[in-house]
Amino acid sequence: MSRTTIVQVRAAFNAYRRQLDTMGMDTSQIELIHTTAAGYRVVKSDGNGGPGTRTGGHLGFTASEAYTVLMAMTRAMNFATTWSVENFERVNR
């Protein structure tokens, strides 16, 4: 098993932001924060959690947890976006 690095977490965060951009959301005020006490979080400039995150934007205490959560959210948003485009008529009934 390999170790998850901060570089991988940042790459997952960038993929998350790109997906939000694709969905038309403003990502200019969203950032990834890591502290020893609170772990990894995605927060907006007003202190609230980023879209799709748990309370306070908490992703996990380890890089591995944060990476897994970011990738899961990104894949879910990608699936929802792709599905709604492919099934436009079903969505807009």
Image (cartoon, grey):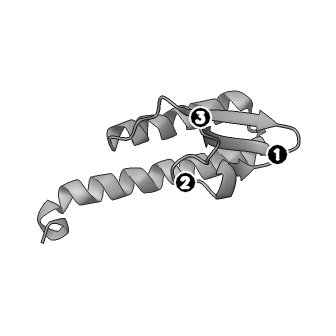
Identity, as a three-letter code, of the amino acid under mark 1: Ala
**Crowd around label 2: few <14 · some 14–19 · many ≥20 (10 Å):** some
Image location of residue 18, percent across then percent down:
43, 34
**Residue located beneath label 2 in the image:** 72
Cα separation between marks 2 and 3:
23 Å
Q: Nearer the viewer, mark 3 or mark 1?
A: 3
SS type, badge 3: loop
Image location of residue 14, percent across then percent down:
52, 32
Image location of residue 80, percent across then percent down:
35, 58
Image location of residue 45, percent across then percent down:
59, 34
Give the farthest residue toward the right. 37
Which of the two labelled residues, at mark 3 and mark 1, occupies the earlier sequence position? Answer: 1
Identity, as a three-letter code, of the amino acid under mark 3: Ser
Q: Does the CB distance between marks 2 and 1 fall below 8 Å? A: no
Cα separation between marks 2 and 1:
20 Å
What's the mark number on residue 38?
A: 1
Residue at 27% from the left image edge and 59% from the top image edge: 83
What's the mark number on residue 87?
A: none
Which of the two labelled residues, at mark 2 and mark 3, occupies the earlier sequence position? Answer: 3
Which of the two labelled residues, at mark 2 and mark 1, occupies the earlier sequence position? Answer: 1
